[in-house]
Image (cartoon, rainbow, N blue to C red):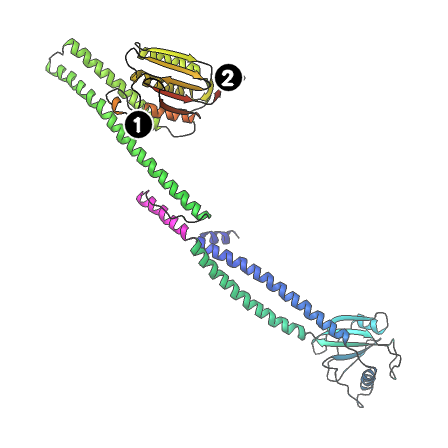
Amino acid sequence: MTGTLRRLRALPLRSRLALLVATAVAVAVAAVAAACWFATKAQLESQLDSSLRNVSVSNDYMQKLFIACTRPDQATVPPIGGYTVQLVTVSGSTCTSAGASPIGVTAADIAVAAGVRDDVLHTASTKSGTRMRVHTYAYETHNPAPGLVPGSFAVSVARPMSEITDPLSTLAWMLLAVSGIGVIGAGAAGLWIARTGLRPVDELTQAVEHVARTEDLTVRIPADGEDEIARLSRSFNSMTASLASSRDRQAQLIADAGHELRTPLTSLRTNVELLARSEDTGRAIPPDDRKALMKSVKAQMTELASLIGDLQELARPDAPTPGPLQVVALHDIADTALERARLRGPELTIRADLTSWYVRAEPAALERAVVNVLDNAVKFSPSRGTIEVALRDGELTVRDQGPGIPADELPHVFERFWRSPSARQLPGSGLGLSIVARTVQQSGGEITLRPAAEGPGTIASIRLPGAPQPPPGL
């Protein structure tokens, strides 16, 4: 059995489907043929039994048969219309019509002859071996023939079983032939249907093999209809489109990262070369220039470290949660971020109105997101400007008084490495808001940027699901 299953699994799918269809049709046809054969057999037997019960042997015929049996030299009695007639005595002896082979007597026949039973239907064999269907009934008459006494004899009327078995045999061969043709036709139709129905699967297989061989993710499969094959084709197209988009984003990330790294690296290399040339030539750099040079080197290294940190953050898998979630106080995180923002913009006025709000998030990632939003506000605020920060009902808003963001640039602010033309000269990598958006979305929230309703500036809004009170037990 195991070997058969292994061989079946080794067959192509279309062959297995064709075999399955042929097997199902064979079972159905066999069941129908068997039911037809048995129904016909029962009908023929019923008709034969009815015809035997309806045969009536006259008293004159019985007298002639008795005389022929007792004095065979005086008379012979032919069968009645193809029926074999036989007398059965209580002792079990028989007398059969002329030309007929005696039929074997059973105990039931003798019981009928003795008057114990009225009649009996059974199948018996003649001495020549012919199978006969026999109806035996008691001999009763008010005017018995000489020598025939009621209660001492029974009459058996028989017809050969070949009248049933021959048609049944012919029917069996016909059903077998029809069933074989039906099964072969079903197998051929199943193979054709399997080939036609699995053609999209073949196309899908070829497409997958092509992608695996060439890494060409532009392949698309026509998907017509709403069946499972069409859904599979659409799923494959969506998968390849997603993979192509992911590969494009990866390539773009590498290109953008290389572009962003080139500027600080070039500047850092220049400054280091100046310091090395000073050491090699022995020409000392003026103290003020050297101090400015070292300050530039430090700033460039800080910028590189920040950029590398941002790249590491973006390189993390886009899982629903980048780390274990904890219940954290958003107001405390915002308060910590405000302290850092005041240090980075000491000339700015930062006003805060924070109410309690607890959320589920990764503390470090959420703090980095809030710090990035405040850093943007500090970066774009004018000297001696004001930044307003508020936390109410789970919505953290940060408003600056900077130049604002044009409406045509708002759709791009959360893209990686995107920087507005006005921010190209300011420090930064263009990854801050992208990281903020990712962190907020992973925490189940949303972030938006919109122009201030009155006056210049931009309002950054972060909304996170949570509650004003911590869960019990914290």
Image spot of residue 82 (x, y percent): 71, 81
Going by the numbered disc 2, the residue's amino acid type is Pro
Tell me what residue is drawn at x 70 percent, y 79 percent. Answer: 128
* Left or right of 473, for residue 105: right
Q: Secondary structure at mark 1?
A: loop
In the image, residue 54 sits, relative to residue 387, either above or below, namely below
In the image, residue 110 sits, relative to residue 217, either above or below, namely below
Going by the numbered disc 1, the residue's amino acid type is Glu
Q: Residue furthest front?
A: 454
Comes first in the chain, label 2 or label 1: 1
* Left or right of 414, for residue 260: left
Looking at the rendering, the stretch of residues picked out in magenta corresponds to: 198-221
Label 2 and label 1: CA atoms lie apart by 38 Å
| Residue 280 shows in the view | yes
Tell me what residue is drawn at x 58 percent, y 70 percent. Answer: 173
| Residue 322 shows in the view | no
Instruction: Find residue 350 and report its image quarter.
Output: top left
Instruction: Find residue 317 and report its image quarter.
Output: top left
In the image, residue 336 sits, relative to residue 199, either above or below, namely above
Q: Which residue is mark 1?
A: 409
Tell me what residue is drawn at x 30 percent, y 27 percent. Answer: 409
Instruction: Find residue 141 and report its image quarter.
Output: bottom right
Q: Which mark is residue 433?
A: none
Asked if residue 215 is among those painted magenta in the image, a careful observer would answer yes
